[in-house]
Image: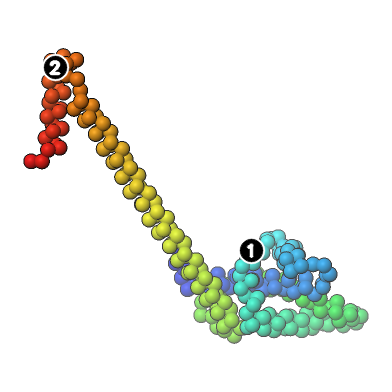
Amino acid sequence: MGTVRTESSIMHRWLAIQLQVNKFCSCYEAILRRNQSGTTIEDKVVAAKKYYIELDKDNKSFGLEHCWNILKGEDKWKAKMKELAELEKDKQASQKKKKNPTKDKRPRGEEETQNNELEDVVDEEMAAKKRPEGIKKAKQNLRRGGGEACMEALDKMMAKREVLDKEKEKAKEERFLATLELEKKRVANEEKIAEAKLLKEEKEIMLADLSSLNPMQRQWIEKMQKKIMEKELPN
């Protein structure tokens, strides 16, 4: 059986998943905007993973691709990602304008690309400075920030986990029953072998040539023959 997690454990795990998947989404979107010809979807995913490692302060790789595959198809998740991207663009543009009021503007396409590629870095810095939230506050923040879609996706992942656990338990039970059946067959086979051996020995005793034996041997054989006959004959 799988480990039973508390509500607090599940919530904190989900917040970690949300942060890492958001970062990877930013990396993947940045790779898509490069619009490199001759690259497949698999190539773009690999490139996004490399980009993720480059931007991570500890050079950690992205290990939640299975979660990303589930979340990326959710309409509410995609809408939330678009909303976050737009807010981050406005924030970055405002910050650059304040820091460099007289600096020549860059082409819009280049500026948008750089802003979008910095989204995951900003998310990471915010997460590092942020203290752990309480369960109630985390729930409220999730609901305010499109948390409904996140919780739906989490429910789907948990449901799939439950199905997988049940399948594993069923397979374990089937293996146990198969092992038990094999053990029964082994014991039955050993009993047959023992019975055949006993019949062979009894046959040899019953057919023994008493004339070639000394008195003591003859007495033992006759005693054994009597026991065999008593066992075989009905009372």
Residue 201 vs residue 153, the one in the foreground: 201
| Residue 204 position by quadrant | top left
Q: Pinpoint residue 185: horizontal percent, then vertical percent.
A: 34, 47
Q: Residues within 10 Å of mark 2 (few under 14, many from 20)?
A: few
Q: Residue at x 11, y 35 (%)?
A: 230
Question: Which residue type does callout 1 highlight?
Answer: Gly
> Above or below — where is 92 with respect to 209?
below
The image quadrant where one finds the N terminus is: bottom left
Q: Pinpoint residue 226: horizontal percent, then vertical percent.
A: 12, 29
Q: Pinpoint residue 224: horizontal percent, then vertical percent.
A: 15, 27
Q: Is residue 5 left or right of residue 200?
A: right
The image quadrant where one finds the C terminus is: top left
Residue 63 - label: 1
Q: Residue at x 14, y 17 (%)?
A: 216
Label 2: element kind = helix
Q: Which of marks 1 and 2 is nearer the N terminus?
A: 1
The span from disc 1 to disc 2 (Cα, nearest Å) is 83 Å
Question: Which residue type does callout 2 highlight?
Answer: Met
Q: How crowded is mark 1: few (under 14 residues within 10 Å), some or many (20 or more)?
A: few
Q: Residue at x 13, y 15 (%)?
A: 215
Q: Can residue 186 be seen? A: yes
Front of the two marks 1 and 2: 2
Residue 216 - label: 2
Q: Pinpoint residue 21: horizontal percent, then vertical percent.
A: 65, 71
